[in-house]
């Protein structure tokens, strides 16, 4: 077992260092490891079968729908209206623009289900505006990178769907509801940091808007926010499944962006469909390749061995859960979120369940943990997008990121050790 795991990890990380795409790195590492115990034909056949089996899930059909709806809404003027709404509500507070940045990223991330999309859409508008108002560009970039990850917890979220599949059947509706409170807590924690930072730096505040204008800005953003109520309400009410909710989200996004706001033209749809297909193909290839690797890990009994090892280190659940979080934070800094969820869920979930943690709570803990990794060097995708928009270097935003990291870590610890935070909403709704 030890030698198999060593070969698998060695080949995988060598390929990553050589800049081989992560899905190919996973697949090739799995194939080479399997060739140690069988011939090429049965190894390749087994991998193909496991990849096909991993993709044979009705729930996965929700991913292309939510990706497409996010792309349509990202180009349909949604971001601008959400920013204006947030500006009208909290722009006059100390650090108003930073607070607006956080709230806008939360709202747009929740609607689009993509941290990168939130970074690009909100950052493209907010970062130049914050610079114009005298904010440190590096601090502004750090705020955008951290805040954009909150949308991965607040549904609809593709990564929660992937975890539901990796965990062996946790309710998607329950996961969606479980993500609300932790996602809001992360956003509030980031806003506290921004408020304190802005007070110390003496950043300017915006003027209070007349109540009538505030009402009009909020009203203009309501059709965009209504998507969340349609999707979540329909799933919880049993009107449609998560997959069907994705299709309805596409229809509503097209109606809103093309019919109401009229900022997406019919001629632009083919490009959006192509981009959606490309993104979906990348995600599904990752899922297929990672499913094959997960099967190999299970076949070699690596999850059980690792579970026994962790439980043998200490009898204290607090210590073991802290160790799991530290490992996941390290993993998240080097590995993309989708393969990380698919690989480490079968390894760590049995350990967490033996310690009394529910699969629901563990899923939220894991996604929040890996969200921190998504804005951590060296692999964090949102960092590079943010740096490109802010026209700054990665090393320049690390220092202002540290207090934001700390606030996210505090919420992570609360989610880890207080089950109520993740389980309260699903329990109230009987999910």
Image: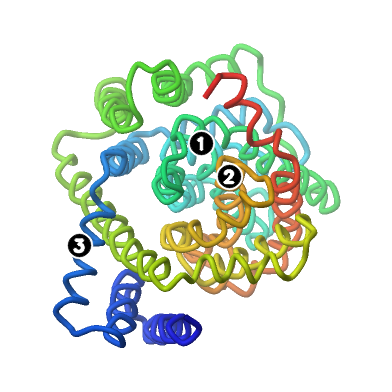
Q: Residue under label 3, please give it.
A: 49
Q: Residue 306 location, x and y as percent? A: 57, 70
Whole-percent x, y for residue 243 in the image: 30, 33
Q: Counting residues from the N terminus, which is met first, the one under dot 2 or under dot 1?
A: 1
Q: In the figure, 305 relative to 202: above or below?
A: below
Q: Does residue 112 sit above or below 425 in this rendering?
A: below
Q: Nearer the viewer, mark 2 or mark 3?
A: 3
What secondary structure is found at the residue carrying circle 2?
Answer: helix
Earlier-in-chain disc, 1 versus 3: 3
Cα–Cα span, label 2 and label 1: 8 Å
Q: What crowding class fits label 1: few (fewer than 14 Cα within 10 Å), some (14-19), or many (20 or more)?
A: many
User: Badge 2 local density, few (<14 within 10 Å), some, or many (20+)?
Assistant: many
Residue 235's image quarter?
top left
Instruction: Left or right? Give the position of 294 relative to 49.
Output: right
Residue appearing at x 25%, y 34% in the figure: 264
Residue 161 visible within the image: yes
According to the image, label 2 marks what residue?
A: 364
Q: Tell me the residue that label 1 is attached to.
A: 175
């Amino acid at each position: 077992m030890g030698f198999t795991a060593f070969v698998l990890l060695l080949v995988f990380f060598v390929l990553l260092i050589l800049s081989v795409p992560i899905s190919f790195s996973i697949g090739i590492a799995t194939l080479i490891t399997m060739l140690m115990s069988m011939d090429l034909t049965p190894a390749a056949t087994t991998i193909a079968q496991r990849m096909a089996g991993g993709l044979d899930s009705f729930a996965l059909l929700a991913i292309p729908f939510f990706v497409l709806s996010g792309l349509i809404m990202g180009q349909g003027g949604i971001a601008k209206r959400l920013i204006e709404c947030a500006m009208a509500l909290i722009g006059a507070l100390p650090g108003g623009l930073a607070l607006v940045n956080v709230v806008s990223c939360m709202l747009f991330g929740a609607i689009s289900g993509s941290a990168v999309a939130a970074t690009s859409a909100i950052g493209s508008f907010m970062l130049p505006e914050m610079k114009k108002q005298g904010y440190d560009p590096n601090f502004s970039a750090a705020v955008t990178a951290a805040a954009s990850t909150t949308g991965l917890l607040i549904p609809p979220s593709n990564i929660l769907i992937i975890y539901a599949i990796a965990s062996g059947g946790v309710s998607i509706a329950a996961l969606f509801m479980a993500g609300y409170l932790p996602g809001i807590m992360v956003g509030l924690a980031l806003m506290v940091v921004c408020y304190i930072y802005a007070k110390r730096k003496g950043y300017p505040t915006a003027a209070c808007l007349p109540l009538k204008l505030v009402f009009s800005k909020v009203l203009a953003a309501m059709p965009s926010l209504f998507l969340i109520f349609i999707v979540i309400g329909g799933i919880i009410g049993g009107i449609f499944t998560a997959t069907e909710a994705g299709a309805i989200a596409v229809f509503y996004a097209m109606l809103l962006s093309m019919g109401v706001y009229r900022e997406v033209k019919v001629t632009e749809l083919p490009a959006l469909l192509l981009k959606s297909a490309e993104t979906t193909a990348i995600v599904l290839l990752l899922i297929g390749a990672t499913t094959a690797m997960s099967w190999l890990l299970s076949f070699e009994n690596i999850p059980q061995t690792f579970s026994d090892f962790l439980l043998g280190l200490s009898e204290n659940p607090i210590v073991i859960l802290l160790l799991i979080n530290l490992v996941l934070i390290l993993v998240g800094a080097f590995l993309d979120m989708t393969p990380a969820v698919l690989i480490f869920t079968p390894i760590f979930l049995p350990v967490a369940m033996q310690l009394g943690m529910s699969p629901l709570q563990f899923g939220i803990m894991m996604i929040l943990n890996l969200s921190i990794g998504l804005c951590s060097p060296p692999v964090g995708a949102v960092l590079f997008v943010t740096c490109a928009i802010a026209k700054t270097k990665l090393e320049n935003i690390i220092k202002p990121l540290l207090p934001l990291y700390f606030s996210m870590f505090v919420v992570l610890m609360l989610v880890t050790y207080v089950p109520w935070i993740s389980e309260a909403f699903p329990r109230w709704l009987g999910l």
